[in-house]
Image: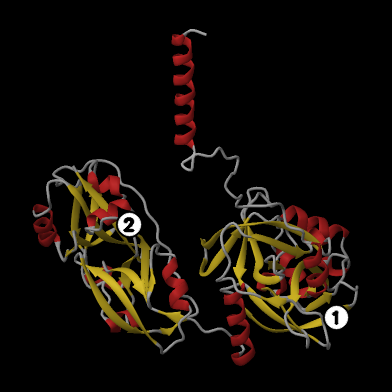
Amino acid sequence: MSGFQRMATLCLVIFTSLLVACAEPDGKASQERAEPLVTGLPDFTRLVEKEGPAVVNISTITRQSEESVRDQLDQLPELFRRFFEQFGGEEGVPSMPQEREARSLGSGFIISADGYVLTNNHVVAEADEIIVRLQDRRELKAELIGADEQSDLALLKLDGEDLPVVNIGSSDDLKVGEWVLAIGAPFGFDSSVTAGIVSAKGRSLPNDSYVPFIQTDVAINPGNSGGPLFNLSGEVVGINSQIFSRSGGYMGVSFAIPIDMAMDVVSQIKEYGKVSRGWLGVLIQEVDRDLAESFGLDQPKGALVSQVLEDSPAEAAGIQAGDIIVSFNGETIYRSSELPRWVGRVKPETDADMVVIRDGKEKKLEVTIGLLPDDPEMALRGAAGQAAPDGANALGLKVRAASAAELSRLDLKAGVIVAEVGDGPAAKAGIASGDILVTLNNKAVNDPESFSEVVAGLPESGTVAALINRNGNPRFLPIKLP
């Protein structure tokens, strides 16, 4: 080997050593890899064997009287009524039983050895008879102790002793991605077991303002309602309640009521026979990007107050329409749907602290929470305008004065009626003819003159908020200025 070849070989060895040294700081080649975050799949057999006996099947019977049957017949089309009159019994009454029974199925679980059973309210609602079937095939009649429609929970009582019971865990400790298991009776198939993971926590569903649902991908179907959701420690962390489906069957998204909330409902039903929730007395809406800009926020957050109800705790505390509630009793409010949950958990006549953003600045308020009325919900709707009115201003709006009767009917003190909406920023924002414009850019609009003054003072560009009232429903709309 020539001297040149020996020199080239030596250089190659040195270069290779340098590459290895750069790849391994300690200068040693290593085949070690990072520890896997997930190892294997869980074995649920012991959990099912231990906790399964406390899961029950619930069947209900709802009896319909002869009078109820007649009322249903009266609602039938004339063609069908004639059929029953022709082939029915005496006096045209169909030859059918005087009393009919409607049956339904669901699940539940025993929470105490003396026979208390927890299930969904919709499983036993309006039932005349409730039958609970245990895993050992015993069938026991159950008494409805109490129910709470808002949380869709019902507490039953069996006449028994030393019954198998579940272990109650904590839904607050549950983590997204954690394995969970459901036991129930889908389609009447008793003691069916399905498993999955927690997909999300604190989900809000339409018409369920007071329940922060646990979302899972556990297969839940009709008949699973009211059954328990277990963690790997064999503790109940939720009550399977709803599914999201376009077909009526499972599509990968299921929702469970957190057990911490459910046990609070149980204790109130046992002690008082009903459930009491806190009430603030405001109508709120979500803060989107455009509204955040119009209120001077750097990002969307909080619950925007669109109306303060008269003689409510909010009115007494000084909360105003246009306030953005960003904190309640130390809990940060990221979305408007979170506020009702936290307020509802506060006992009536208890003081609570809150932080609102008003005129771009944070303001601390203290409010004495009231008792939630029977029907506190109000719907909010939106629509858009058309056609350009002659002589419309830069917003594309024509307004007229509102009469005292029009304002009184909607319990408003001031505002102007939107007479016409043309092409422009207001139409794009969703303002429609007939809306009552209450404030614009956080300034009161009492009459057409003040409306013109506020419009004249609007910035040339940016986003401003308009508070409208449509059929009694207040709502802030962001108007983007050109």
Asked if residue 196 is positioned above or below residue 25 in the image, the reply reads: below
Residue 3 is left or right of residue 118, and the answer is left
Is any part of residue 59 visible from this angle? no
Question: How far apart in space, not on screen, are marks 1 and 2 (Cα)?
Answer: 53 Å
Residue 147 location in percent, x, y? 64, 80
Which mark lies nearer to you, 1 or 2? 2
Residue at image point 20% right, 43% down: 389
Mark 2 secondary-structure assignment? loop
Asked if residue 250 is positioned above or below residue 23 in the image, the reply reads: below
Please state, as top left, top right, bottom left or bottom right, where the C terminus lies in the image. Answer: top left
Residue under label 2 = 300
Residue at image point 77% right, 65% down: 184
Q: Residues within 10 Å of mark 2 (few under 14, many from 20)?
A: some
* Foreground of the two, 164 or 80: 164
Residue under label 1 = 140
Is any part of residue 267 visible from this angle? yes
* Amino acid marked by disc 1: Leu
Residue 99 location in percent, x, y? 83, 73
